[in-house]
Structure formats: C-alpha cells, structure tokens
Image (cartoon, rainbow, N blue to C red):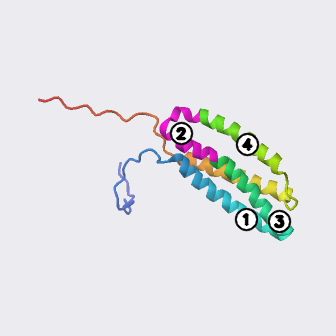
Amino acid sequence: MTSNAESGPASGHRPVGASGPTRSLWLNLLRRSSIAAVAGLVLCAVPAGLLNGGSGALSSLLGGLLVMLFFGISLLVGHFVGRHNPSGAIGMFVATYFIKVVGFAAVLFVVGTPDWLDGRWFVIGAVVAVVLWQAAEIHGFSKARLQIYNDPEEKEAPNA
C-alpha cells in the first residue's frame, strides 16, 4: 500500500536528542509559581484599589505575599535538602511545615491586625495566590523530567 501524503518541511534545524532530568526542579517551580502568583496579585490589587483605595490594594498584596512566603520556604527547603539527601526531603518538608504553621501563627498573634488592613481583600489576595501558585506547581511538575531508573551501564566489549 502506498501513500500520496507529502513528507513536508523538516521539523527543526537541530537533531532531536534525549533530554535528561530536569535541573533544579524546586527552583524552577519557585520561579514559575512566583510569576503566576505575582501576576494574579497585581490583577487583584487593581479592583481592590478601585473599591477600597490603597489599603485594599496593599491588603490584597500582603495576603498573597504571605502565601508566597509560606510556599516558597518549602520549595527552598526541597532545593537545598533534596540535592544532598533526596530521601530526607519529605521529612524536612514535614518539619518545615510544622515550623511554618507555628511560626506564622505566632507572628500573626503577636503583631495583630493593623487598623488599615482590609480583611476581605487580604483573604482574596491569599486565595488568588494559593490557587495560582498551586496551578503553576502542578503544571511545573507535569513538565518535569524525573529520572526514576538508573541509566544502563555500558559493558566493555571483550578483547577479541
């Protein structure tokens, strides 16, 4: 059986090669997620500023920045611990999560709520940051190339 389809143009100028594992997965996720969250917070600050003035805009930005700090610490821990001890990274995530929750709660209770903070826009900014951060992380993980098997060892040819 033959085909009358034409081959078409070449797909690229360089040869296709194998791609290795993703370099610096955690920093890549931090970059992607930060860009997504900041873009969403800027878009969230516009209606907050129009409806509630500068305090609304600043409140939405601070709510989102708090979320970004919370998640960013975890990705930095994953980067630094995962490089040297990949199997210990999960344990460090759990320990860091506990420290973050207790630490952030203590800071929020000690500092309290400033009079100028608009609680509604603070929560809206935090929710926007969480949703966009998590979406960017999921997208980043879906694009990551993680090597799960060791490369096969090349056997030397016997001297003949």
Give the residue drawn at x 59%, y 51%.
30
State the CA–CA distance, disc 4 to disc 1.
Answer: 29 Å
- Asked whether the beta carbons under mark 3 and mark 2 sit within 8 Å of each other, the answer is no
Nearer-N-terminus badge (2/4):
2
The residue indicated by pointer 1 is: 43
- Extreme-right residue of the structure: 115
Q: Nearer the viewer, mark 1 or mark 3?
A: 3
- Asked whether the beta carbons under mark 4 and mark 1 sit within 8 Å of each other, the answer is no
Nearer-N-terminus badge (3/2):
3
The residue indicated by pointer 4 is: 103
Q: Of helix, strand and loop, which one carries label 1?
A: helix
State the CA–CA distance, disc 3 to disc 2.
Answer: 39 Å
Give the residue drawn at x 47%, y 35%.
148
Q: Is residue 86 left or right of residue 39?
A: left
- Classify mark 4: residues with Cα within 10 Å, few (<14), some (14-19) or many (20+): few
Nearer-N-terminus badge (4/1):
1
The residue indicated by pointer 3 is: 55
Q: Nearer the viewer, mark 2 or mark 4?
A: 4
Amino acid at pointer 4: Gly
Q: Is residue 6 above or below residue 87?
A: below
Amino acid at pointer 2: Val
Q: Nearer the viewer, mark 1 or mark 2?
A: 2
State the CA–CA distance, disc 4 to disc 3.
Answer: 25 Å
Q: Of helix, strand and loop, which one carries label 3?
A: helix
Q: Range of the magenta residues?
A: 73-90
Q: Of helix, strand and loop, which one carries label 4?
A: helix
Q: Of helix, strand and loop, which one carries label 2?
A: helix
State the CA–CA distance, disc 1 to disc 3.
Answer: 15 Å
Nearer-N-terminus badge (1/2):
1
